[in-house]
Image (cartoon, rainbow, N blue to C red):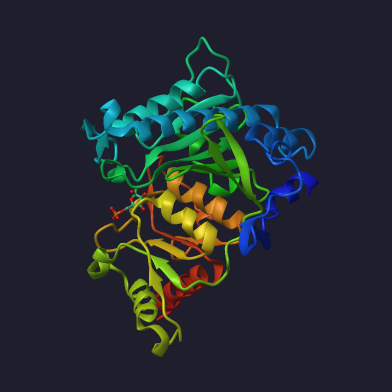
Amino acid sequence: MGAHRQGVRRQARLRPRAVDGIIGAVFHPPIRPAAMRRISLSRYLIEEQREKHWIEADLRLLIEVVARACKSISIAVSKGALADALGSAGAENVQGEVQKKLDVISNEILLEANEWGGHLAAMASEEMEHPHQIPHRFPRGEYLLLFDPLDGSSNIDVNVSVGTIFSVLRCPEGASATDDAVFLQRGAEQVAAGFAVYGPSTLLVLTLGHGVAVFTLDREMGSFILTQDGLTIPADTAEFAINMSNLRHWEPPVRRYIDECLAGKTGPRGKDFNMRWVASMVADLFRILTRGGVFMYPCDAKNTRGRLRLMYEANPMAFIVEQAGGAATDGRRRILDIVPEALHQRVGLVIGSKNEVERVTRYHQDAGAA
Ligand code: F6P
């Protein structure tokens, strides 16, 4: 790891220092000038390509373009009512969900930004029934981009964090990108994945298959700056995230797990658990990446095939979480091993701190064996 990267990890410390005769904790600035410590996304990617040879130039371009699109989406989201961007677009997407104006705007931003660079063979979006082909006037590349342009968009009108999730696959050699089938690859085949959170600050979480890095958007400079590298999820946790209103629909293993958490100190787990549910997966997952936890949207009697999308949500998040030392299953199988059957396929999801995900998965196995 380079000295610069280590510098980012080093936290600015609080040191007691005399200030006008008062002893107080004051911010002690790091020794190196700020400008030298700042690693932009561009520089990070160039180092991944040139020094570590972990990515190719086209993949670097792809990530930069997606990040640029996320900046534009962040601006649109932050303008909200001022840009008349809130509310419904008056249509439904392929999933039968009401599209918000910002769903449509975000989808357009990602399509427009990515179609002319020559790095993509095709794109697939949660908001579109069929893949988007690269117009003939532009060159074609070897990558496939999949995205959920605005995850958690039901939160948009109430000013809660939303985000963009993306996944990158390689287009199989000789395959026609006009065929949905080229996208139907296991999550383990992803070459990159990431998500942006449009919250109090705009963040970009990225994996290129060698750990997880977080970039924060410097709004004045207009660039994403590396603020965390080598992110690791604690293996244990005392916090879970699930939509409790679905309790009556859950399968017995999920009920058993949550009952045990709710029993607290005097129950079988011997500790109290806390619950958080933002109802915006990007926000819930960023919290889990930061301080641990388990997120569940399992298959249940209402959503027998699960609620979240395998290709646009579960796969990219599972790749990121595994890269951070966590785990992700559908309750039975590792998410990244699932062979997709359809582009818009749904899946049950249990994701986050390794030991908790393994426990939930074990409860499913126990129930299956009983
Ligand atoms: O799939 C979209 C999504 O909004 C996720 O971001 C979120 O975790 C989930 O759905 C919220 O589901 P519910 O509306 O059941 O709380």
Query: Which residue is at the front of the view, 1 or 244?
Result: 1
Q: Residue 30 location in percent, x, y?
A: 72, 50
Residue under the point 77% across and 37% down: 53
* 289 up-or-down from 160: above or below: below
Query: Which residue is at the front of the view, 211 or 56?
Result: 211
Q: Residue 96 location in percent, x, y?
A: 24, 40
Left or right: where does residue 27 sit relative to residue 352? right
* 244 up-or-down from 267: above or below: above
In the rendered image, the residue lying farthest to the left is 90
In the rendered image, the residue lying farthest to the bottom is 266
Q: Residue 150 location in percent, x, y?
A: 38, 38
Left or right: where does residue 81 sit relative to residue 194? left
The C terminus - image quarter: bottom left
Residue under the point 71% across and 41% down: 37
Residue under the point 37% across and 35% down: 78
Query: Which residue is at the front of the view, 67 or 62?
Result: 67
* 17 up-or-down from 212: above or below: below
The answer to whether any part of residue 52 appears in the image is yes
The number of callouts visible is: 0
Query: Which residue is at the front of the view, 81 or 68?
Result: 81
In the rendered image, the residue lying farthest to the front is 21
Q: Residue 13 location in percent, x, y?
A: 67, 58
In the rendered image, the residue lying farthest to the top is 137
* 271 up-or-down from 229: above or below: below
Can you tell which quarter of the image residue 249 is in?
bottom left
The answer to whether any part of residue 128 appears in the image is no
Residue under the point 46% across and 55% down: 285
